[in-house]
Image (cartoon, helix red, strand yellow):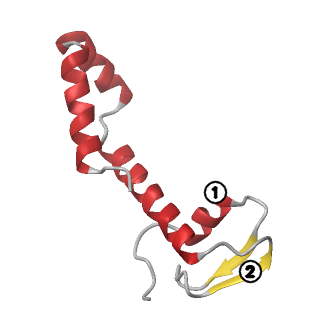
Amino acid sequence: MSYLKTGSVIEAIMSINPDAEVSVIDNDPDRITWDKGDVIAKDVILAKVIAMQYAEKRKKEYPELKDQLDDIYHNGIDEWKKTIKAVKDKYPKG
């Protein structure tokens, strides 16, 4: 498998097991060296990377909080929900 262009294998591993000690070459899940902690299956790591990617994409696309509050004030909760739902639909959970 070629290395992943986005999403950190190390971050995924650490979110699954914060006590793990690993090194990863070129963010490639096939090139993990486990120094401490239980080995985590590659498919579990990749699923976590994908989950982290959708969350990061959503975060970048959501309006700033002050703009969201302004939207609620001027247009109401239902219009705000439509804005947020559009982002959630664009980047669904893995």
Q: Which residue is drawn at 56% across and 69% down?
A: 45
Q: In which quarter of the image is the C terminus?
A: bottom left
> Crowdedness of circle 2 by 10 Å Cα count: few (<14), some, many (20+)?
some
For the residue pair 23 and 40, the one nearer the viewer reads as 40
| Residue 52 numbered mark, or none | none
Is the C-beta separation of discs 2 and 1 under 8 Å?
no
Cα gap from disc 2 to disc 1, whole angstroms? 15 Å
**Residue tagged 2:** 34
- Taking 24 as reference, is 21 above or below it? above
Say whether residue 48 is left or right of residue 5: right
Q: Residue 88: x, y in percent?
A: 29, 42
- Taking 16 as reference, is 3 above or below it? below
The answer to which quarter of the image holds residue 30 is bottom right
**Residue tagged 1:** 15
Q: Residue 85: x, y in percent?
A: 25, 35
* First-in-chain label (2 vs 1): 1
Q: Residue at x 32, y 18 (%)?
A: 69
Q: Which residue is drawn at 66% across and 72% down?
A: 40
Q: Residue 51: x, y in percent?
A: 45, 56
Q: Residue 44: x, y in percent?
A: 55, 68
> Crowdedness of circle 1 by 10 Å Cα count: few (<14), some, many (20+)?
some
Q: Which amino acid does label 1 sit on?
A: Ser
Q: What residue type is labelled 2?
A: Trp
